[in-house]
Amino acid sequence: MNSPGYPAPAPPPAPERRKPRWVLVAVVAAWALVLAAVAVWSVRHDPPTVPEQRDIADALPVLREAAGAVVLAADGPDRVIEIGAPAFDRECGLTPVRGGVEATQEVTVRVRADQAPAVLDSIARGLPKAYAPAIRHNAGNTRHALRADAGDFVGVDATVSDDSTSFALRVSTGCRPFASGLDLDPAPRPAGEPPAAFSAALRAIGAQAAPTVVEVACPNGRTAATVTAADLKAPADLGRSLRDVVAGALVVQAEPHAWAYRAGEVSVVVGDGGGSARLSATTSCR
């Protein structure tokens, strides 16, 4: 019986009915399956968002294609080019605790004095538009840098100063995961029949050699190649030895221990130092 003037007390609330534990477990398991399915689909269909998602074997075809595009853009009648062999750096790190490998290939360009900035501009114009090549200059407009994106995180870069007489166009994959079965120390390939300009320079310096070759496939379907011979017997006077073979050629560099010239469409570089000489001849994409 309630006291006069006081309301009747409210009945206690009914206990909350909780969902059985197995229902929560089922919901969590179903959500995990959804996330796993989305991840699998993404891996198979989405493009990679970081280079770590493509190992070095996946990146090499893009590197080779970009090297061919760089050679085509770099060559010209007023300069000398040389194609370097692909190189692998196994000291790069994907993370502080995970190592990787970076592949690079360089194309060296030799020019006459004061021509480097203009040549770099022409190379940028010659690269595929899809690479979005861009040139940046320092505040004094005395140093110039080329950057281009060949796709799949493969980049092209070069830096020159106003007084540069040679510079390297570097094609790089960036640091990538290792790939099993890939030879990271490929042996040099013996050259077949070298260009006539190579043989002429070799005779001129009085040397014999078993040359090696580096080739790249050009975008226009041709193949460019650099034939090289190193550790040759150096002549007593390099300039005097080359006097006849450079007659009528475009000489880009003429120094006591280094000569670079074009014999028609072939770029030739001869250098001596330390008692030995090195000779290369490059046929271009043109």
Image (spheres, grey):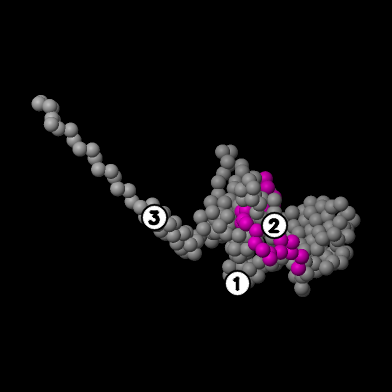
Q: Which mark is residue 59?
A: none
Depth check: give the residue in front, 136 or 247: 136
According to the picture, the residue beneath numbered tag 1 turns out to be: 221
Depth check: give the residue in front, 40 or 80: 40
The residue under the point 9% across, 26% down is 4
Residue type at mark 3 is Trp
Sequence-wise first label, 2 or 3: 3
Q: CA distance from mark 1 to mark 2?
A: 26 Å
According to the picture, the residue beneath numbered tag 2 turns out to be: 88
Picture layout, residue 123 above or below residue 1: below
Circle 1 packing at 10 Å, graded few (<14), some (14-19), many (20+), is few
Q: CA distance from mark 2 to mark 3?
A: 54 Å
Q: Position of residue 83 (x, y in %)?
A: 69, 61
The residue under the point 60% across, 72% down is 221
Sequence-wise first label, 1 or 2: 2
Q: CA distance from mark 1 to mark 3?
A: 65 Å
Q: What secondary structure prevails in the magenta region?
A: loop
